[in-house]
Image (cartoon, rainbow, N blue to C red):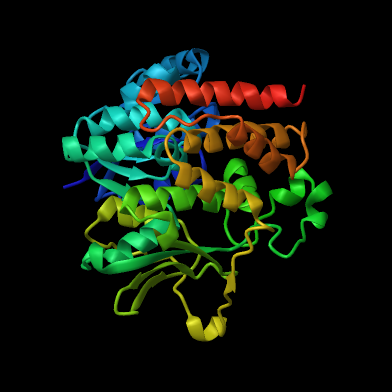
Amino acid sequence: MSKKIILLGATGSIGVQTADIIREHPEQFTLTGFSAGRNIELAKEFIKEFKPEIVCMQSEQDAGTLRGEFPQTAFVSGNEGLIETAVYDADVLVNAVTGSVGLEPTLEAIKLGRTIAIANKETLVTAGHLVMESAKRYGAAILPVDSEHSALFQSLNGEKIEQATKLILTASGGSFRDSTRADLKNVTVEEALNHPNWSMGAKITIDSATMVNKGLEVIEANVLFNFGYDDIEVLLHRESIIHSMVEFRDTSVMAQLGTPDMRVPIQYALTYPDRLERPNAKRLNLAEIGKLHFQPMDYERFHALQLAFDAGRTGGTMTTVLNAANEQAVAMFLKKEIKFLQIEELIERAMMAHNPIASPDLETILQVDSETRKAVQNMLK
């Protein structure tokens, strides 16, 4: 029987690749609904191809335009529309939006006991404790889509998690892995958007260059697998072939390997516990690659990663501040309002100015998120 999929963030990098999986396996999956932000042209293409029942656009104007063109589809808009789409009839909700806007729709879908395939780091970083507590209460499955967390999830499959001693996340190092901090003073937006291994959206590519992305993943790993920060390690691995590893108490290490292709973890989240063919995908040929490289992580060079560990160890609303400050600073960098190294500088200033609240409710999290963004904007003045 075909699984019904709701896809939040259909026009982003993960969303487009999720659509590829649905396209490759039309007998397995139906795209019942999606959200498309402001990308009205791609939304039209998806509507024609997948014939969804519900579509959410960011603006009511775009939703109105599409209503006239596709009378058989229900169109909604804004944050309310995003929640309405998230709770629409489906088997799996894929949360692939960028930013903390994905939080409330996810929490509402969890209440229905849905399977949540989560590619939206910010939801887990900002309110991980709420998501996991709620998932437990309502019997919802949270399946990771990030390549690193999918690798950890797969490496833990069939194992007793209490016998695992360490999670090892691999990091490509991003666009500037060979640059010194002095080299980073004047890097341009265009240079920062040039990632060596992965094809991703602008926000995630910048996060990869600053290493905030890996920091968010460390916090996610803590949330998803309940490992302390002393038992989570980051290893520089240029080739992005080993996606992450788990060490066990008998010194065995389990790893998941593959070519850098996000469709693999996306598909696994949609099919778990089964695996489907990927007939057109490039297979991993280790003989062809010949060598894999690893280096310890330099936390002074990648200062933003250290900030993420600090925020995670502090806990409470500090991870919300880390995420909100980063989102605001990256948006400012992309508009060329600040320099590259100012991203982590603004994050650090926001964290230092914040008095963390230990177990925040949703209202507190949203308030801290909003206040942090304003504070970061005002730091320039």
Q: At x 44% / y 59%, what residue is drawn?
A: 230
Q: From the top left corner, tell me how far across and down residue 279 is, in percent.
A: 37, 66
Q: At x 51% / y 40%, what residue is drawn?
A: 12
Along the line of sight, which residue is nearer the eye, 183 or 227?
227
Say if residue 230 shows up in the picture. yes
As drawn, the residue found furthest toward the front would be: 355
- Horizontal side of 344 relative to 91 (left or right) equals right
Task: Report which quarter residue 345 is drawn in.
Answer: top right
- Horizontal side of 22 relative to 77 (left or right) equals left
From the viewer's perspective, is residue 269 above or below residue 46? below
Along the line of sight, which residue is nearer the eye, 154 or 78?
154
- Horizontal side of 60 relative to 49 (left or right) equals right
Q: At x 65% / y 52%, what residue is drawn?
A: 303
Say if residue 32 shows up in the picture. no
Q: From the top left corner, tell me how far across and down residue 149 is, in percent.
A: 39, 56
Q: From the top left corner, tell me how far across and down residue 333 is, in percent.
A: 72, 36
From the viewer's perspective, is residue 238 above or below residue 186? below
Along the line of sight, which residue is nearer the eye, 325 or 45?
325
Q: From the top left corner, tell me how far across and down residue 208 is, in percent.
A: 60, 52
